Amino acid sequence: MTTQVQYPFDQALIESFSVQNNEPDWFKNLRLAALEKIDVLPLPNPDRTKIDKWNFTHFQQHAQASSVYTNVDDLPEQVKSLINVEGGVKNLYVQHNQTAGFVSLSDELKQKGVIFTDLLTAVKEHGDLVQKYFMTNAVKVDENRLTAFHTALVNGGAFLYIPQNVQINEPIQTIFVHDNADAPLINHVLIVADKNSAVTYVENYFSLNDELEGIANIITEVIAQDNANVKFGAVDTLAKGVTTYVNRRGYAWRDARIEWALGLMNDGNTISDNTTNLHGDGSFADTKTVVVGRGKQIQNFTTRVIHHGKGTEGFILKHGVVKDNATTVFNGIGKIEHGASKSNAEQETRVLMLSDKARGDANPILLIDEDDVMAGHAASVGRVDPTQLYYLMSRGISKAEAERLIIYGFLAPVVNQLPVEGVKKQLTEVIERKVK
Amino acid sequence: MAGSTLVIKDLHVAIEDKEIIKGLDLEIKPGEFHAVMGPNGAGKSTLASAIMGHPKYEITSGTVTMDGKDVLEMEVDERAKAGLFLAMQYPSEISGVTNADFLRSAINAKREEGNEIPLMQFIKKLDKSMEYLEMDLNMAQRYLNEGFSGGEKKRNEILQLMMLEPSIAILDEIDSGLDIDALKVVSKGINAMRSNDFSCLIITHYQRLLNYITPDFVHVMIQGRIVKSGGPELAQRLEAEGYDWIKKELGIEDEIEVG
């Protein structure tokens, strides 16, 4: 592509943003180097979805100063419903557009050396750690145009570090509130779980009103060091007018475990990449994703587990409901590299079609470059089973309610795995609203 | 509830254009237990599914009424709300929906909005029924029939029967695949329902079940019709002598498959 694109940003804008945030030079330089690559690199290439006409890079202004929440009472009601207010808010970060709105970490965890703060603060105060892991292991700056764009213009996010041998029982929660259409959500969450540590993390991305437009460019990196255990939950509910690129990556060292439970419920066009790199021997990934496509939205969900280490195990489960005129593509990729002997790659993709005009595509791929492995996949695209409907209705349940139960059950694997009751309830409600 | 009367008149049922039931009459009054027996392929299970409204079966003529109301005009869920229940031979598995949630939805579906069963009352009733059927209480939290053994599924059907308290239950080969202990438990559950307000249509291939549940009437179904009716002694004679004597007595010849 040689077309000259006029971007709404340049070196001066990035420099002034960086200076305004008092960012260290290494971070500013990282941004500027990435800026040079945006034009050179191609867009990501999600299998079976054409995205060259989508707007991922144009916005009105880079960041919007938004109100902060000085205490829990200030939080919008939708946010409050996601957290356990009664038990006392412990480990929570709420971001309002690009502004760090609220952050809280229990004294106990602080004493243990846990770091939990907004990303732009982390860059300043924990620069050595951030520099080591930010866009180095899991995602690379120059992977594609949108990773470079992200690095150059990142304007929000969170950093979580769990020191060696620290096991956190209470979930760590982040909520990213979007209510401004002009400024893009270029958000980065970096989680580093040091050796033998354990953490459960859950995040929400949501638009405060349904009419919002804009772009979201989200990258999450989860680094699980030797024998670390990370349980990651997410519920995305960005509005219809928001075009989203979301890239959630895991990098697992020896015997580490990363478990994803993703409720991807955006109403707008979405490209999602969820990849786990099983780098160390004996590492493990379990990735469960549920989605609902409705209206005219076009979505592409790629879930990938790459086996490098020996004896690694990767499980992919994807359940999607597609209705109205929506198009949803599911790419499931299990890749076993040469040398990753005794590894196991399993995947299951099921798509439930609720309308004649909807399009659903299940695309399971196994790429195996090693002999001594196990692998399997199952995929299906179909309608609500009439025999199941009949069975439920024969107990007096109405057709609409029977369908609701079947669909809810179909999407339950992720709901059940979310660690915070409020988020679980939210996902249940979102599912009900979307499939109605 | 004062029980219900089910009347079937000259019922004809087809599946994929092949007629299976060819003019069947049956009347079940409140409190009565009827058994329908017959050789394989007689159309027994078709009868059960047709009464409940399985989408695969087409009623080509005849009527089914319950207390005078046209059952065939009702949607499947309306039939259930009217008091019909079918314990199925092959219950569906529904992933992600717990047994308990399903049962509560089913109970509440029959009640008016705003008059849902109180949670504690529901749990008590569920625990009591499960204990009665000697079921592991954890099964309430398992997904509906998912991964259940054949025997567990049958027990779960009877659990639903006990929880939903219909006025007329059809049991479609509830005894198939059950060992003798499970058969006793399932029978115990059905017998516990016996009252003047509850009637039952027991469809079975074997007389064995009728040792535990004594029917008031026994009907023999062959080639899509009820060809002989009698009391419990008829079932015993069938067990001892098979169906050939009836065919001989009535001059029924075996159908030859054309094709």
Image: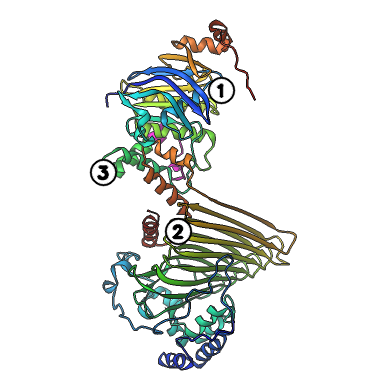
Residue beneath disc 1: B41
Give whichever of B74, A68 is nearer the camera.
B74
Give whichever of A280, B36 is nearer the camera.
B36
Have a look at marks 2 and 1 and say if they share a chain.
Answer: no
Between the C-alphas of marks 1 and 3, the distance is 43 Å
Of marks 2 and 1, the one in the foreground: 2
Residue beneath disc 2: A325
Please tell me whether residue A205 belongs to the stretch shown in magenta. no
Label drawn at residue B113: 3
Q: Amino acid at mark 1?
A: Gly
From the viewer's perspective, is B87 left or right of B69?
right
Which residue reaches farthest top? B249
Question: Nearer the N terminus, badge 1 or badge 3?
Answer: 1
Q: Is residue A88 visible?
A: no
Please tell me whether residue B134 belongs to the stretch shown in magenta. yes
Between the C-alphas of marks 2 and 1, the distance is 45 Å
Q: Is residue A73 above or below residue B20?
A: below
- Of all chains, the one bearing label 2 is A
From the viewer's perspective, is A435 left or right of A337?
left
Q: Residues within 10 Å of mark 1 (few under 14, many from 20)?
A: few
Q: Residue A22, how many percent across, how many down?
A: 43, 92
Q: Which residues are magenta?
A: B129-144
Q: Amino acid at mark 3?
A: Glu
Classify mark 3: helix, strand or loop. Answer: loop
Q: Residue A348, how many percent across, how many down?
A: 57, 55
